[in-house]
Image: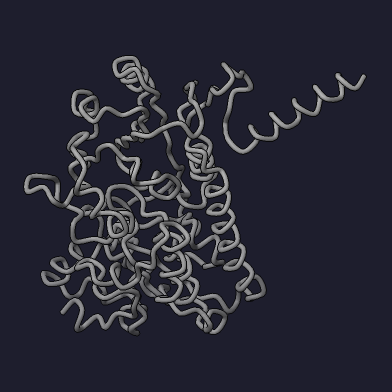
Amino acid sequence: MKKIISLLLVLVMILSLCACVKIDPLVDGENSVTLIDMVERKVEIIPGSYKRVVCVGAGALRMYSYVGDVVLLAGVEDIDNTALSERPQMFDSVARPYMLAYGESFSKLPSCGVGGPMAQAAEAEKILACNPDIIISEFKDVAKADALQKQLGVPVVTVSSGANGVFDENFFASVELLGKIFGKEERATTLLKYITDEKTAIAGKVANIPDAEKPNVYICGLGNWGTTDHLMSAEKYISFEIAGVKNVLSGLGMQGIGPIEKEKFVELGEKMDIIIMDAAAVKNIKPLYAEDKTMFDTCKAWQNGEVYLEMAYNAYYTNYEIALINTWFIAKTVYPEAFADVDMTAKTNEVTKAFLGKELATEIFACPSSFGGYQKIDTETFFG
């Protein structure tokens, strides 16, 4: 009976360890386990054993930087190596906190591929030259991941986040997966608890604000870097939902992020009490405004000077920490009294330290496409 009880206790412990990430219950050996990655591939790994890591695909290196040790990196994509003269540079003016934190280390590593939005394919020969013992990928093609793993003879593990970014269950599952792979379960748990606590704190501050006192807010500049403007928005925007913000687009039936028609923008303009503009849209809005200064004439927020700038959160995929900071800024902008105790510089430093171990507000706000940081925009000066 004692032996049976002991065996049951061991089984319970194993199941508890596997509960935090998607792990197949099959144990393949004394030290290895089979994980199920974010595209439902079974990958055999030995937790905590990896010494040479390569990350490929938009966002993979960023996500690894939140959990893993950057000294284990054996190579980086050219887009993440600012020491190179020939490389994709379309994101160099925008804050990417993982680059601000660890860019100097990245610049000393060999290339594992070009990277960037125009080169979203694994370059096996360059990866092989880095001699990795594991690859973290954000490429979603299952067949190609299997082929790369077979070709290189090392585990290829795919991570990803869903539509809700830093608040999405897929992001949480990816962080947990990385924690398990690299023996960083405590680090992963700490980060995810921090995000959950931040979400709870924001929601708690707005919980008792009556709907009648909530202004109508329009968010614009969402979407891919370089392609967005004042018409790119979303009806269901997770930061608005967490912060209890009334979206002026509510009821339109939009799916995901996309453009609204110019006529719809004009129609809703008189209802827009506040505009929150993502900094990614500024470079496209400025020339449009220079051509036609009447484009915001029907917009109440523009006419009343209630236009605010949040930091660009999409640059070579999502800056998850900035997406969280933006949620605080949105809440503070819409409900200034409830968030009077929140200083955006201090909050930015707090969040980046939680994600990357470094306070990066000064560096983020100094990036050219940050325009000095979170602010209320003087539209005449800013766009004139």
Quadrant in which the N terminus appears: top right
Residue 274 point in image, percent of width and height: 41, 75
| Displayed quadrant of residue 32 | top right
Is 270 in front, or is 40? 40
Quadrant in which the C terminus appears: bottom left
- Count of numbered labels shown in the rendering: 0
Q: Is residue 371 left or right of residue 72?
A: left
Residue at image coords 53%, 26%: 35
306 relative to 30, above or below: below
The residue sitting at the left extreme is 85
Q: Is residue 259 left or right of residue 178?
A: left
17 relative to 305, above or below: above
242 relative to 16, above or below: below
202 relative to 102, above or below: below
Residue 167 point in image, percent of width and height: 51, 52
Residue 10 point in image, percent of width and height: 75, 27
Is 311 in front, or is 53? 53
Is 366 in front, or is 155? 155
Residue at image coords 35%, 22%: 145
Residue at image coords 27%, 61%: 95
Is 368 in front, or is 71? 71
| Displayed quadrant of residue 127 | top left
Q: Is residue 291 left or right of residue 73?
A: left
Q: How is the image coloured?
A: one colour
| Displayed quadrant of residue 53 | top left
Residue 359 point in image, percent of width and height: 39, 68
